[in-house]
Amino acid sequence: MQIFIYIMIFVFGLVLGSFYNVLGYRLPKKQSIVFPSSHCPNCKHKLHFIDLIPVLSYVLLKGKCRYCKKKISIIYPIIELLTAILFTLSYYLYGFSINFGISIVFSSVAVIIIASDIRYLVINDEILVIGGILIILLLGINGDFKKVLDLIINGVISFLIMFLIKIIADFVFKREAMGGGDVKLLTLIGALVSYPMSIMTLCLSAFIAFPYAIFVYFNKNDHVLPLGPFLCISGLIIYFLGINFNDLMQIMAK
Ligand SMILES: [Zn+2]
């Protein structure tokens, strides 16, 4: 029975992941998420059900459009798989609980931001606001008003810290070193994992992004690096490992 639930949640993650691809692809371009129906971005051919099965279609079509044979971005199946894995992990850790709901919302926000920031260097405010409201609602329904207050306080302090870091970094590098979207994303992450851990998220993301940053520096002319996906990955690692500030201090003191 338990294995059946895991499979259902994994498949649910794949299907929602497929929808998050659409959101990540269309929201930054201010396109409707319903019309037009899914089509190949190259030849504009309408895609049928058989072309839209998460991951499976990509594998069966060997990563190429059925109609024009143009390569399909590997981002699509990665986003679908990532969503499925995060959902399954959420259930493994929290079972069916309020924390499961919060975990699903946070994973969804992170995945949509990864999908849009990689492509367009855009982090949509709507996604962050909807995610934040949903998390507060879930805690409210559960009567955890102290947690709601904690969340808001940690969010506000994270925002102030990140805003300060942005001002300093922009001044030092003499260009926009950290986008406004990154500051808002770290506000949500900080609200969830506490404000000291939002600083750790930023540090961890810089560490993870370093090899890619070197690649970008030597291979792309614009030298622009989307920070959002790395912040999301770091935030997810810290959130799912449940690392809190006190534990970290104790580990460091040893
Ligand atoms: Zn095509």
Image (tube, helix red, strand yellow):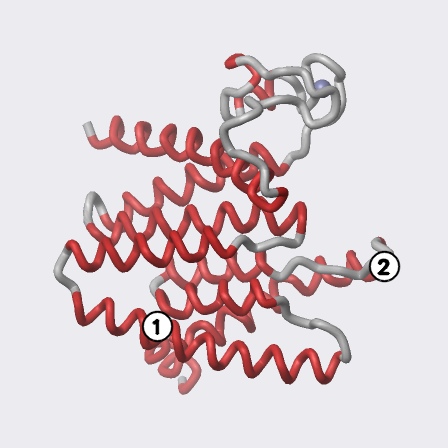
Q: Which residue is mark 1?
A: 244
Question: Nearest the camera: 233 or 92?
Answer: 233
Secondary element type, mark 1: loop
Identified at 32% across, 71% down, the residue is 152
Instruction: Identify which amino acid the numbered label 2 is placed on.
Output: Phe
Q: Which residue appears at 27% of the width and 73% of the height?
A: 150
- Can you give x and y, in whole percent of width and height, for residue 64 in the image? 70, 21
Q: Quadrant of the C terminus?
A: bottom left
Residue that mark 2 sits on: 218
Quadrant of picture, ligand 1: top right
Few, some or many residues within 10 Å of mark 2 (<14, 14–19, 20+): few
Of residue 1 and residue 134, the one placed in the foreground of this image is 134
Specify whether 96 is left or right of 241.
Answer: left
Q: Locate residue 20 relative to residue 73 in the image: left or right.
A: left
Callout 2 secondary element:
helix
| Among numbered discs 1 and 2, the one appearing first in the sequence | 2
Nearest the eye: 51 or 8: 51
Position of residue 175 measured from the top left corner of the image (x, y, whole percent): 75, 74
- How many marks can you see? 2
- Amino acid type, callout 1: Asn
Q: Give the image location of residue 241, x and y in percent.
A: 37, 60
